[in-house]
Amino acid sequence: MVLVGNIGAMVVFLVAAAGLGYGYSKFGRIPRVEIAEFLSDSTELADGVVAENYLLVGVDSADGLDEDDPVRSSRSSIGGLRSDTIMVLRVDPASSRAALLSIPRDLYVPIAGSSGSAKINSAIQRGGPEGLVATVQDYFGIPINHYVQVDFKGFSSIVDALDGVPLYFPYPVRDRRSGLDVPEAGCVTLDAANSLGFVRSRAYQELIDGRWRTDGSGDLGRVRRQQEFIVRALERAFERGVRNPVTLDALIDGALEAVTVDDTLDGDDIVGLAGSFRDFRPSELDLYDLPVFDGSAGGAAILRLQTQAAEPVLDIFRNIDPSTIAPSSVRVQVLNGTGEPGQASEVAADLRSVGFAIGGAGDAQQLGVARTEIRHAPGDDAAADLVARWLVNGGRLVADDEVGDVTLVTGADYAGIRAEPETTTDPTTTTTLPRTTTTAGPRGSTTTILGTIPTEVPETVDCS
């Protein structure tokens, strides 16, 4: 559903780029939500260029749909408004590129304004749009400059205006919960109902060799399908909207019906962005996801963030150079591998004094360690390397799937920390062991655990 927020925003860009002045006047009809005080100021980059982050939210609301619409029967009986899809769109006029970060709805995070944690999709139910904005800003450290909200009916209006969205399916697919039903393989133009079923699907099944096989990737598989749909829908919007004023007008009206925006976003903002993105194409939309792992809370299945592995991705949306890592962004667990009394506490205090966050201190399972080790999750090389560069004698980097925080295990060669970190790691004192950095995704695709490169949309046949 939030996909329409992207489509709707790009449609307005198209309006200005096509020289249709009435798009500006129509923009004033979009409903607003008053959350200006909860939004961050825009970030001014070099040469006065302003980069902004849009929080794009698809809400689980069937308001406006017909009583017999199948979407109503697929909704949970739990009351209240929930965010079914959450994404952050970063627009950088200087590069004429856009980046899109998908946040899994089952991610377990501290909820702003409450005393506890819960799945992030409950934040809007507990605190409204402002509560979700605050939760995203507080937990991820991403400034949110604007807010765009879409519901089921708005999504359907946009897909109808596009005359459907074509996708390629290697097998027949279905999801009895979301209503997705594609009985034939090949190029299929999804109508509004099947489009909604596709992007909402969490029990996705493919008919392979006469058997229905369930995609076990759950929320993560749904994120990848949503990103694929976004690109295909944007391609459809560009192909039809720019060349056909009648279709473009329908898209504008659909966008007006689809979205609610914050009270600071006005026509001048959109028209200004339109000029910078005049030559934008869907292939220039960089797609990112977050490294997560399975967990449980209160008996429910959840996802937890691999906090340090996520830093390079989050830094893109924080307007921070991904190659620059500060000690404050690295959490270190300190384990005493020598058996020297009090060593773990002393090392932890020294690391804290130079800015590192400390995730605990204690004894290692085995004592008598000769060489200091910095153990880290796959993809956390940069964070582990930073810790090594602060140590007088460095340390050996060891990739370990079972650690969360970077874990420093002191050895007999440990000699304290430096006044300033080494500029580069000494290869004679620090070794990175071989490791696997990919994990299998749906349909045999691969995604990086770290996610520092854009997630690749699955290869599909051209159905345009």
Image (cartoon, rainbow, N blue to C red):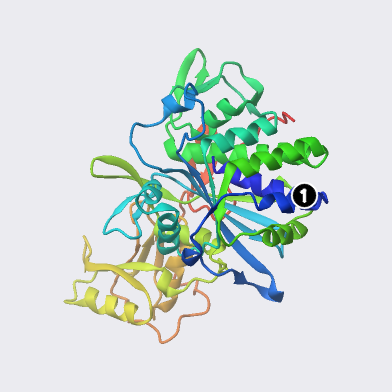
Instruction: From the viewer's perspective, tell me whether residue 296 is left or right of residue 247.
Output: left
Q: Quadrant of residue 269?
A: bottom right
Residue 421 sits above or below residue 192 on the image: below
Residue 387 visible to an observer of this rendering:
no
Instruction: From the viewer's perspective, tell me whether residue 378 is left or right of residue 256.
Output: left
Instruction: From the viewer's perspective, tell me whether residue 222 is left or right of residue 286.
Output: left
Residue 10 sits above or below residue 326 on the image: above
Q: Position of residue 360 (x, y in %)?
A: 25, 67
Q: Amino acid at mark 1?
A: Tyr
Can you name the residue that lies furthest to the bottom here? Answer: 419
Asked whether 42 or 315 is in front, the reply is 42
Give the secondary structure at mark 1: helix
Q: Position of residue 359 (x, y in %)?
A: 29, 66
Total numbered circles:
1
Q: Residues within 10 Å of mark 1 (few under 14, many from 20)?
A: few
Q: Position of residue 92 (x, y in %)?
A: 66, 62
Determine the residue positioned at 76% across, 35% down.
247
Asked whether 124 or 430 is in front, the reply is 124
The quarter of the image holding the N terminus is top right
Q: Quadrant of residue 373?
A: bottom left
Can you name the residue that lies furthest to the top here? Answer: 210
Asked whether 384 or 450 is in front, the reply is 450
Residue 19 visible to an observer of this rendering:
yes
Instruction: From the viewer's perspective, tell me whether residue 119 is left or right of residue 289.
Output: left
Q: Position of residue 411 (x, y in %)?
A: 29, 71
The quarter of the image holding the C terminus is top right
Q: Quadrant of residue 327?
A: bottom left
Determine the residue positioned at 44% across, 76% down.
389
Q: Which residue is mark 1?
A: 22
Residue 120 sits above or below residue 369 on the image: above
